[in-house]
Image (cartoon, grey):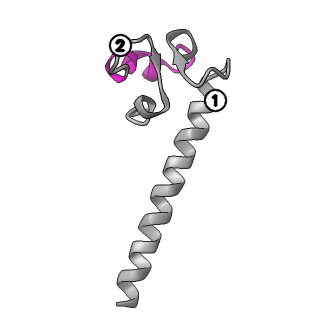
């Protein structure tokens, strides 16, 4: 039982860390502080620019934080 709890704790911490890192990246790309990433802002990362249209689910030309979470870079 202790091993199971330890494994679950480690998994939880890993997920929280990955999420925090993703948000750090989001803020790095959102250079104008608008709360979204434009195509122009995405151009600094070729992989992000390549995936932009697919990630922009609502088609508004900007990536929200929730859309950016699906970026595989």
Give the answer, above or below, for where 12 lies relative to 63. Answer: below
| Location of residue 55 in the rendering, given as x and y in whole percent from the top left corner | 36, 23
**Does 25 appear in magenta?**
no
Q: Which mark is residue 28?
A: 1
Residue shown at 33% from the left, 21% from the top: 57
Which mark lies nearer to you, 1 or 2? Answer: 2
The tag earlier along the polypeptide, 1 or 2, is: 1
Q: Quick one: quadrant of the N terminus? A: bottom left
Residue 34 lies left or right of residue 10; in this view the side is: right
- Residue farthest bottom in this picture: 1
* Measured Cα–Cα span from mark 1 to mark 2: 22 Å
Q: Which residues are magenta?
A: 43-55
Q: Nearer the viewer, residue 35 or 16?
A: 35
Q: Secondary structure at mark 2?
A: loop
Q: Residue at x 45, y 65 (%)?
A: 12
Specify the quadrant of the image occupied by residue 24. top right
Tag 1, which secondary structure? helix
User: What residue is disc 2 on?
Assistant: 59
* Residue drawn 46% across the image and 70% down it: 10
Quadrant in the picture for the C terminus = top left
* Location of residue 43 in the rendering, given as x and y in whole percent from the top left corner: 53, 13
Q: In the rendering, at what x and y percent does residue 38 appear?
A: 53, 14
Q: Is residue 71 left or right of residue 65?
A: left
Q: Which mark is residue 53?
A: none
Q: Residue at x 68, y 17 (%)?
A: 32
How many other residues sit within 10 Å of disc 1, few (<14), some (14-19) or many (≥20)?
few
Percent from the top left, x then y, of residue 9?
45, 73
Q: Tag 2: Cα neighbours inside 10 Å, few (<14), some, or many (≥20)? A: few
**In the shown orientation, is residue 19 left or right of residue 2?**
right
Q: Is residue 11 above or below residue 44?
A: below
Main SS of the magenta part reads: helix
């Amino acid at each position: 039982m202790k091993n199971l709890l330890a494994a679950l704790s480690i998994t939880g911490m890993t997920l929280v860390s990955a999420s925090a890192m993703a948000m750090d990246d989001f803020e790095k790309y959102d250079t104008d502080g608008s709360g979204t990433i434009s195509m122009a802002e995405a151009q600094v990362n070729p992989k992000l620019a390549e995936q932009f249209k697919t990630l922009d689910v609502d088609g508004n030309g900007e990536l929200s934080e929730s859309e950016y979470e699906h970026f595989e870079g």
